[in-house]
Image (tube, rainbow, N blue to C red):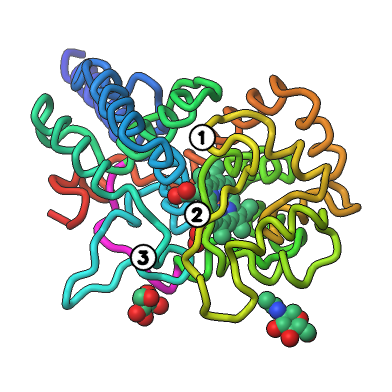
Amino acid sequence: MAALTDSRLTVIGLALFVLIIGGSVNANLSTNFYSSSCPKLLSTVKANMQSAISKEARIGASILRLFFHDCFVNGCDGSILLDDTPTFTGEQHAAPNNNSARGFEVIDNIKSAVENICPGIVSCADILAIAAADSVTILGGPTWNVKLGRRDAKTASQSAALASIPRPTSDLNVLAKMFSDNGLSIKDLVALSGGHTIGQARCTTFRTRIYNETNIDTSFATTRQSNCPNAAGSGDNNLAPLDLQTPISFDNNYFKNLVQNKGLLHSDQQLFNGGSTDSIVSGYSTNPSSFSCDFAAAMIKMGDIKPLTGSNGEIRKNCGKIN
Ligand code: HEM
Ligand SMILES: *[C@@H]1O[C@H](CO)[C@@H](O)[C@H](O)[C@H]1NC(C)=O
Ligand SMILES: *[C@@H]1O[C@H](CO)[C@@H](O)[C@H](O)[C@H]1NC(C)=O
């Protein structure tokens, strides 16, 4: 009888063990992931982002974009943060990132600050997710609780970055497909594109639009042409604000621009060009709180793209290189 009880207990014990281990391998992200292992994490990241943005407001936009480009390439795994080495080619110089992805040193500084308070605990992928959310909040946008528990990739792929990051020349159907491949809806596409309410783009990304497209406000095109010559290769890196009105403030002016045919990128104006997304754009242009709410929800969904959890990946010591 005693032996039977023992074996029953063993079976129950084993079942619990399998549940716990299985559960941690499939662990979902959670907002309280570091609440006991690194209680000062959120305040540390926030203070660092405050200081970085007070030095240069655009850096908030750059960090938000880094997070998007991380998540769309094999999930939110910090892969974009890996520097190239003589024997390794990562994502940073893939065409959509080359000469435009920026903010890496801000993430490195935050990582050092976090390593000082909780060494070896917090992933670079999570630091980027928090820093992106803080950027939006600090620049006047919504606040949401960031889900955490991602681990860092041990590799990165230039070809995956080239294939997976949407291009400014893409039409609506292509944009919709690239978002749906990541579990994001048409509404998420429109809301997340509202990230272009902050930041800058280089002439090379919008030249064709301002010289050769017809669904563009004429005076807006003329204004942009003044700092972006028609000749290919000339002034390629000259910058223009993605939101011509308030490029360092996270508001709904991006959508107000679109309904006036003042989208800077071809891909921006695709969202208001007589198609199925027009009504979403007009809605956001008149209702800033519905944009804020949908943007926050879509950021949480984007942050859920294929995270590494459990024993997958690693917690990098230095965001620029694998351990
Ligand atoms: C829908 C597809 C998208 C396309 C085609 C696209 C394309 C671009 C391009 C071409 C630039 C300028 C890059 C350069 O100068 O070379 C840019 C900048 C930017 N993008 Fe996007 N983007 C998209 C979606 C998003 C999303 C979902 C977010 C974030 C939620 C985002 C955030 C930003 C920000 C903040 C900047 C400015 C960065 C800075 O000033 O450093 N974009 N985007
Ligand atoms: C990145 O840009 C630099 C400078 O314009 C260029 O020399 C290099 O070939 C580009 N790299 C890739 C992979 O396109
Ligand atoms: C605009 O179209 C004209 C005529 O097709 C072409 O010569 C020119 O290179 C184009 N410009 C841009 C920036 O695409």
Q: In which quarter of the image is residue 194?
A: top right
Mark 2 is surrounded, within 10 Å at the Cα level, by few (under 14), some (14 to 19) or many (20 or more) other residues, namely many
In the image, taking residue 41 as reference, residue 277 lies left or right, namely: right
What is the total number of numbered labels drawn onto the structure image?
A: 3
Which label number is shown at residue 91?
Answer: 3
Q: Earlier in the sequence, mark 2 or mark 3?
A: 2
Instruction: Give how far across and how far down residue 158 sits, in percent.
Output: 38, 71
On the question of residue 31 being in view, the answer is yes
Residue carrying label 2: 72
Magenta part of the chain: 151-160
**Residue displayed at 76% across by 31% down:** 284
Report the magenta stretch's main SS. loop
Q: Quadrant of residue 225?
A: bottom right
Spatial separation of the CA atoms under disc 1 and disc 3: 27 Å
Ligand 2 within 8 angstroms of badge 3 C-beta: no
Amino acid type, label 3: Glu
Mark 2 element type: loop
In the image, taking residue 276 as reference, residue 17 lies left or right, namely: left
Which residue appears farthest toward the right when viewing the image?
A: 274
Between residue 96 and residue 247, name the one nearer to us.
Answer: 247
Residue carrying label 1: 248
Spatial separation of the CA atoms under disc 2 and disc 3: 12 Å
Up/down of 101 relative to 55, above or below: below
- Let me know if residue 152 is in the magenta part: yes
Q: In which quarter of the image is residue 1?
A: top left
Q: Earlier in the sequence, mark 2 or mark 1?
A: 2
Amino acid type, label 1: Ile
Instruction: Give how far across and how far down residue 79 sits, in percent.
Output: 33, 56
Discs 2, 3 touching: Cβ within 8 Å? no
Instruction: Give how far across and how far down residue 221 sits, in percent.
Output: 74, 59
